[in-house]
Image: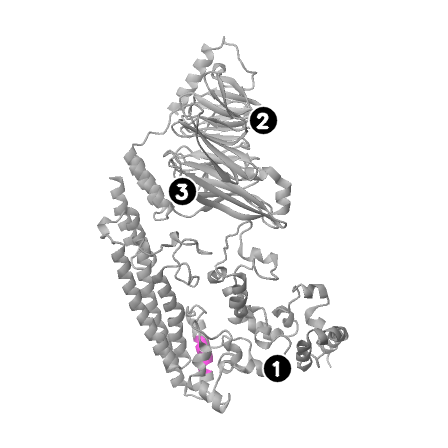
Amino acid sequence: MNVAGILLALLLVPAVLFADECIDCHQQETPGAVIQWQQSGHAPANVGCRSCHGDDHEKILQGNARVVAAVCARCHRQAFAEHSASKHGMGLHTGWGCTRNLPGRDQHECRFCHEEGSTLPVSAVMCARFLRQSSEMGQLGCNRCHMVENACGSCHGNHLTDLDIVRDPAVCAKCHMGPDHPQWEMWQTSQHGTLNRVQGRSIGPDCQLCHMPGGSHNVSHGITATPAGQVYPEERYKAERVKMINLCRECHAGSFAEEELAAADAVRSQSKQLVAEAAEIISELHDLGLLDPMPQDRPAHPLRRHELVLDGQMLYEDISHIERLFFTMKKFALAKTYKGAYHQNPAYTHWLGNAELKMLLVDIRSEASRLRERGGERGADERTLEERLTVLQGKFRRGLISQQEYTELKAEMLRKLTR
Amino acid sequence: MLRLARLFAGLILIILTCSACSLSLPAAESGFPAENMRLLARISAGGEFAIDPRGEQVAFARGGLRLMSAGQDRELQLADEIPLALAWSADGERLAASFGDGGLSRLVVYDGHGQELRSATVEGRITQLRWTPAGELLALTVRLKIFSFGANQRALLLRLDQRGNVRELPLFDGTLKLKTVTGYGETLYRFFRFDLAPLGDEIVYTRLADPPVIRKSIKLVHQHLEAGAAREVYELPLEAGGVFWSADSESLWLSNGSSGTFRYSPWRNRVEEERPLPGRNLAVSRRTEMQYVDGRLYLDGALIATLRDGRARFSGNGRLLLVAAGEQLFSYQLPAAGSPQPVDTDRLGRLLQLRQLRSRQLLTLEEYQQTRESLLR
């Protein structure tokens, strides 16, 4: 035994001694938890209750001694480092909202997102949709998935260490299902999923095999875009693609894998074009004041106040009908289309994804016509100076006119004001 | 410069002509003609006062609310309560006053003769009042709700039109530490101040920032009343003296309360002009480029007289200055200094439109400046 091993053993001895003290009561109070611990790898390794929970029973009762990822990281350093570098390692940052109403919130957290003395959040990564929820919904509907950043038990279970649990794709399904990113359903009904079910994971690859190869805790293996679908810069994109193709080559010809994934890339890019077209329609309606209701006439967005928000901070409530159609298009249909393509599921790629995407664009165009007609949209010459400048600025911001054209057109409009 | 030279000549002439006159005041002033200053009235210590835009009537606190003619000594008692805030309308025909009553405020509007026209009860404390040139009454209302862990402080600008309709413009909604609430008590309210641009379309206000660890400060926020978002434009220490719009509605006069008073552009975020005075008592004329800073009177950047040091207000026409020092209210008849060229209604409408476009961030500052100059040429 090396020196580190001896030191570790010495450190763990008191923990085990204290563990017995806890167990006397907890065999009565929470027998299930005790059984789970006894069957885990922690018990024979002498990692007792106090090793993770501490010895302040009052603090534990108040819910202030949770076993967060940093506690596990004391021993599982590599796993924690891999986890932190992955998309799971940013689960809270991408989805975390105000913790004001959450049980067990830490008051010091306020300063992560708020300017001192203000209730207005300032962080760019705050989840607006979370902020709209009740504390109960925030806890059960949002944080039960996004807590993965800071809670190893989110996948492993709280007192268990059985790797069969985390090697079962169903453990991913808790979050990776449903309308926004149904990777589990896509995989399950794909050829890979069927082979996995019938022949086992040595023949049919599963979530862990492709995205966590070799038992890595970096779940982002081979993924080439951010959670919001923004493709990585070229260098990173290429590196991740090579990683995935190397995995595919265990069963497929490399050229086949490259072509398949390139086709999925094309589907992603084409689908995003459709979404961009819809966003342009809505932005123009907004610039003309034709959304119903306009952002200034509805409850303020928790982060962007009365801006039109069509990006990742878009809400699905307190918006106009055409925006609601857009939300479904972007958040659900777009994700199904291209994620279906990457997960080799034709039904998702086409009928549940692409077809929905295009039909929603039809709905959006139609709703836009209705709003224009109802708003009695005036010709460009009849609009007020402010309306004309707003439309012009929108076109410039969305890259439809150059800086020079924008400046010249604006100068012409302003000259009329001084005549 | 020519204007300044004329003013100096005028002042010297007045001093020479009246050198035989006996001063009615102790010689706390210098460089100001004695016959143009007088002890106007006794006032409650720290009490509010306001002079009508024509410089003819003064409303002030003494054992309630009193109204007197600046030229005569006749006084009228309008209310038995001490007013929290006072403001005359731009035409001098109406006087608004607020009175405190626990967590509620009573807002009263009087006519020019002191007759009550209307009144309303409002939740919170109305700490400041302003009238827009169009006759809308703005009331800064601060609400404080104390909890075991601290207090929620909410500031609203109530906008009351001439028909009695009320709109609310939320300015701030935040938390104060319990220690801050107990430590500052009633003085907490003084951290919220606002001023309306002379053109009547934009406001600037101060609010207390009370962070858990770093030191408190006062944030300065600029906002167009109809367009665009509120923008934090500056941060001041707690002892700051006040904030006022300059006569052209383009910049702000601020003081840090300890070493400097300066004119600041909220759009360019830069200091345009500085005075080496703490500015604990600061007042700015809305018609002329005249400022009162800790007892010093400046015109076009030059010191023209030293007066009593106290809380000061200029009349709307820029011809009278009132200074409250202790329990005394002094009046100073000011020389006729040049005022900005009046703008006709049509050009004024277009200027306001231009300012609104700027607030909506549809123009660059250069585009705004060029168009403004063309418009006012």
Of helix, strand and loop, which one carries label 2? loop
Same chain for mark 2 and mark 1? The answer is no
Q: Which residue is mark 2?
A: B45
- Left-right relation of A305 to A219: left
Same chain for mark 2 and mark 3? The answer is yes
- Distance CA(mark 1)–CA(mark 3): 62 Å
Q: Could you tell me which chain the residue with mark 2 belongs to?
A: B
Q: Which residues are magenta?
A: A238-246
| Three-letter code for the amino acid on which mark 3 is drawn | Leu
* Quarter occupied by residue B181: top right
Q: Which mark is residue B225?
A: 3
- Distance CA(mark 2)–CA(mark 3): 34 Å
Which class describes the residues within 10 Å of circle 2: few (<14), some (14-19), or many (20+)? some
The percent coordinates of residue B210 (x first, y second) are 58, 47
Dominant SS type (magenta): helix
Q: Which mark is residue A162?
A: 1
Q: Could you tell me which chain the residue with mark 3 belongs to?
A: B
The percent coordinates of residue A231 (x first, y second) are 41, 70
Same chain for mark 1 and mark 3? The answer is no
Q: Could you tell me which chain the residue with mark 1 belongs to?
A: A
Q: Which mark is residue A90?
A: none
Report the quarter where the N terminus of chain B lies.
Answer: top left
| Three-letter code for the amino acid on which mark 2 is drawn | Ala
Q: Is residue A158 above or below residue B13?
A: below
- Asked if the residues shown at circle 2 and circle 1 are in contact, with their CB atoms under 8 angstroms apart, the answer is no
| Three-letter code for the amino acid on which mark 1 is drawn | Asp
